[in-house]
Image (tube, coloured by chain):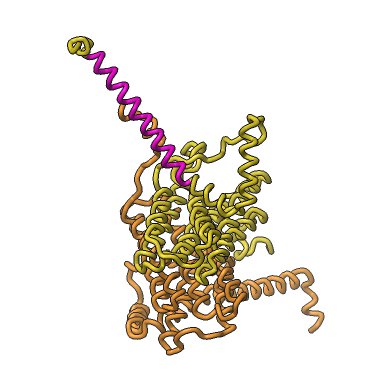
Chain colours: A orange, B yellow
């Protein structure tokens, strides 16, 4: 009788996996701490905590998959943590770092970043399993957050500390935000094979990059994330121009087939 | 051929419903603006925007259901908006309003509120359709946010403006946070029928409450939300004490049945 009390009956507790959700909580904490730090003008800490959240966010899903502890709860919680650590935190970092000097426009651009981040996450969550996973549809929100964080670290490193007013930053943050909700494709690194043989030269290039990353962390991190953000549009332009060239060729072919004498007439 | 270009093939755009998602965006904006306002010590605005977000959040889902425009995208986006407007915003409001004076403990308590809010949302999202909907499992996050917002408005109204240090607030916010993740049941108002006949006196009581709400909005809002937050534990205590009483009665009954002469012996 004791086990069938009405109080216990309505409980639906099944328990949650500790390790992956603990890592998600740590990621959420980094995002939360970043917000407080950026409002205290501690921009370096605010930027670093976002990058720590990025590392943790990369870990939780992988650990859950390896240890076979993936759960619907974990996915939901991870998504809520992401919108804070990679949506709200970097937006407020950019706002406090430089955009607040523009008053209304400062928080409007910061809000655009948050909205685009949330829309990107919501779209990603409903497209899991539907869209091919070799490419990302739009700049992923952790990458967008990292672009902002590494930009702050880069400026801090080259000596432009503290608040600096610049219209460029408003445009820059808006562009990054729009890339998130765009349909531009980004390489997902999911078909990258680290356990196969590679050409000697490409391995050597990787070593050089790693040495530079250790020697000039701030600069390399900035270049890597900005490069990734730009890679999508470049990829798109190359694809689109190839497509246009192909179409032009086909049009010419069709024309020649339709009136095969027209070319000869002119000669 | 034009419609089958590789660029357009990989798109999975199906379009999103404008009105409900626009209301969700407005709710998100309120949450975002509240964060900025609370860091500028504009506590009244920060609290009011959270309550506006509450009204908008109540609208979006209902409008989507009425106009038959519910979508998985809308639900995901709504959830991400909620964690910002009802998790991060009220936590930072409480932090900036009074808790920041306690340094480390201030942001630890603020973080506890955010984590509990995110956990509550993640649990709610995976329990939709599983648990009975007549009651909420734990204090809903919009209600928890409103308790904090109306507390700030109440103190502002009775003249205790600006920052005030109080250990009580740290405990209060922690309690509200823990109520969210608890298994304490809350009335969901989902079986409340507004279109049926009610006794004259209960209608009259409602009118009196509405008049008071207009006359003393801040005080009434504070009482209503705090009352709701307390209603769960009170309900639980009543239920549990009834259960204990019932068990004691049954135990007594069983004892009497096992040795029916024991009572007579003593006489």
Q: Is residue B21 visible?
A: yes
| Number of numbered discs on residues | 0
Identify which residue is drawn at 49% across, 67% down: B162
Side of B248 relative to B155 (left or right): left
The vertical placement of A226 against B261, above or below, is: below
Q: Magenta residues? A: B229-258
Identify which residue is drawn at 61% across, 65% down: B7
Q: Quadrant of the N terminus of chain B?
A: bottom right
Identify which residue, A89 or A144, lies in the foreground.
A89
Magenta stretch, main secondary structure, is helix
Identify which residue, B158 or B63, lies in the foreground.
B158
Quarter of the image for residue A105 reads bottom right
Identify which residue is drawn at 36% across, 63% down: B108
Side of B73 relative to A263 (left or right): left
Side of A17 relative to B216 (left or right): left
Residue B177 at x, y percent in the picture: 41, 53
The vertical placement of A210 against B197, above or below, is: below
Identify which residue, A58 or B136, lies in the foreground.
B136
Residue A168 at x, y percent in the picture: 58, 83
């Amino acid at each position: 009788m004791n086990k069938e009390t009405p109080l216990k009956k309505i409980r639906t507790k099944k328990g949650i996996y500790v390790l992956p959700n603990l890592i998600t909580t740590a990621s959420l904490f980094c995002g939360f701490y970043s917000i407080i730090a950026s409002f205290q003008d501690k921009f370096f800490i605010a930027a670093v905590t976002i990058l720590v959240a990025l590392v943790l966010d990369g870990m939780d899903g992988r650990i859950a998959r390896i240890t076979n502890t993936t759960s619907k709860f974990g996915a939901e919680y991870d998504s809520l943590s992401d919108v804070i650590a990679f949506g709200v935190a970097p937006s407020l970092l950019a706002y406090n770092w430089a955009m607040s000097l523009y008053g209304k426009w400062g928080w409007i651009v910061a809000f655009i970043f948050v909205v685009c981040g949330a829309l990107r996450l919501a779209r990603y969550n409903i497209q899991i399993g539907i869209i091919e996973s070799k490419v990302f549809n739009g700049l992923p929100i952790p990458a967008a957050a990292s672009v902002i964080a590494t930009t702050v670290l880069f400026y801090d490193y080259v000596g432009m500390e503290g608040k600096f007013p610049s219209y460029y930053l408003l445009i820059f943050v808006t562009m990054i935000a729009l890339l998130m909700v765009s349909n531009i494709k980004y390489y997902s690194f999911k078909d990258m094979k680290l356990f196969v043989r590679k050409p000697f030269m490409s391995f050597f290039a990787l070593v050089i990059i790693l040495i530079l990353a250790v020697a000039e962390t701030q600069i390399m991190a900035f270049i890597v994330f900005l490069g990734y953000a730009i890679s999508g549009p470049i990829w798109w332009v190359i694809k689109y121009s190839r497509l246009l060239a192909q179409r032009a060729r086909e049009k010419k072919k069709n024309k020649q087939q339709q009136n095969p004498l027209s070319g000869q007439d002119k000669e």
